[in-house]
Amino acid sequence: MTGPAPASDADRMLVEAVLAGRAGAFERLVREYQGLCWHVVQRMVRHPEDTRELCQETFLRVHQCLGQYRGESALKSWIAQVAYSVAKRHLERRRIPLAEVAGDEDGLSAAHAVADGHDLEGAHGDAEEAVQLHRAIERLPPVQRTVLTLYHLEEMPIGEIASITGLAEGTIKSHLFRSRRQLRDALGHRIGVAA
Amino acid sequence: MNHDEHEWQAQETALRALRDGSAGGDAGYRRVIAALRDAPAPMLPAGFAAVVARHAEAQAAADRRFERQLAIGLGIAFAVGAIVALAVFGRLGGAAAAGQWSGSLHWLFAAAVCVGVTALMPKPRASGSAQTL
């Protein structure tokens, strides 16, 4: 596994421009990373209004702490780390569990939890199935949802996700493996195995 | 290769196939991963970046104002302290007082050097405004 990639020249130039107080630089930074921030925070908290507020809080903190950015990781990872920590603190304040309780080794009960009474196997048509699958993803615990998003949507390597979340790489891999298996199990046996 | 490792490979194969746009991989995992890669678009209001940039600049300006006021306050407190010290020691007069004065002057000099060095230190962020809109 590889660690996080260092900052690119573009990252450094953008950070220098913001720190130098160049007009429009911070707005450009926000515009470039607001999608990433939204995905991280939304996957954690799921509430659109809270997500908007937390995204704003994230960028205010980025602006305040940008002088501490050393370029050891990509700016994208650093901002995702700030977003993750803001969303995590929000959930902790509300006493919402961040990850599933350990000890469910076979993942079967979790598969039932993500299915949550919805008959994915009986869902008719691809569109219906996709909707049910999205609902099943939403029912995963916040950390698992976020890890899946960073890996699949943002296409970040496991080492980078580890530095963002502060979790061990083995834990990230385990979350990915188990969550995907749970979602696959929730789909049921309707789908055959392609060659 | 144990069962879990085999299944991990099946998941990763489905992911690679989807990224490459090629066929192959477990159909169930392909659907799961396709759903994971299909997230709803961010629901941030238009002009979000401009609004956040304005807030950030306003906050930074407020922080700078507070730091400046704090520095002025400390400067005033220091000056008042110096005046009080001068008044107290000034009344003593005589040779004994002169001895104490020379000691106090050392401290006053050291304090003045500290203030000077702090004032000359580079600031972490440029003080110029970066108002974006």
Image (tube, coloured by chain):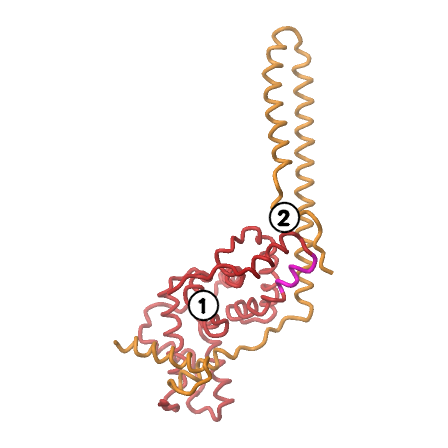
Give percent across and percent down for residue A101. 37, 68
Figure colour of chain B: orange
Quick check: is B18 in the magenta stretch?
Answer: no
* Horizontal arrangement in the rendering, residue A186 relative to residue B132 (left or right): left
Q: Which residue is mark 1?
A: A143
Question: In the figure, A128 relative to B121: above or below?
Answer: below
| Chain identity for the colour red used in the image | A
Residue farthest left in this picture: B1
Give percent across and percent down for residue B32. 44, 82
Q: Which mark is residue B125?
A: 2
Which portion, as a residue range, is magenta? A23-30
* Horizontal arrangement in the rendering, residue B45 relative to residue A118 (left or right): right
| Quarter of the figure with residue A112 | bottom left
Q: Are marks 2 and 1 on the same chain?
A: no
* A21 or A153: nearer the viewer: A21
Quick check: is A29 in the magenta stretch?
Answer: yes
